[in-house]
Image (cartoon, rainbow, N blue to C red):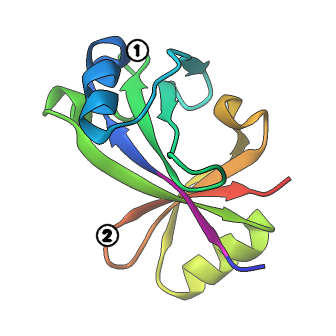
Amino acid sequence: MTPRFHHAGYVVASIEETAPSFARGLGLAWDGAVIHDPLQMVRVTFLPANLSGEATIELVEPAGPRSPVRKFAEAGGGLHHFCYEVDELTTQIAASQAAGGTLVRIALPAAAFGGRKIAWIRTAEGALVEYLERR
């Protein structure tokens, strides 16, 4: 199965301060659920798409001074990454590296996805891509 676009990640300084207006501006509903991921050192929430099974938006907030998105949030935040759901992370990582990408973070379980593993690749063009392993 081919990779499926899952979400776009947007870094914000505060989810609680940003999510309600972000959702209103896009005509989306926000359920208020915030997930802390200690391995990724972030807090995240999702603004679901209007159609079931469609891509969504993830708001990402730094969780502490060592968070990898802290400096980006302090600089104003913004579009951070694209996430694709893939069948098998090892195969996708190898394909991405063969295409000139660099592994930024090894595969780790993600709290936001029920423990499914994610890995991070910086493409040769400079885009940050999160790969989420399918169940």
Q: Secondary structure at mark 2?
A: loop
Q: Secondary structure at mark 1?
A: loop
Residue 9 locus on image (x, y percent): 41, 45
Residue 85 locus on image (x, y percent): 67, 61
Amino acid at circle 1: Gly
Q: Main secondary structure of the magenta part?
A: strand
The Cα–Cα distance between marks 1 and 2, rounded to whole angstroms, is 26 Å
- Residue sticking out furthest to the left: 75
Towards the viewer: 26 or 120: 26
Residue 53 locus on image (x, y percent): 66, 54
Q: Residue at x 32, y 78 (%)?
A: 125
Amino acid at circle 2: Gly
* Residue that label 1 marks: 64
Residue 19 location, quadrant? top left
Range drawn in magenta = 3-7
Residue 126 location, quadrant? bottom left
* Residue that label 2 marks: 126
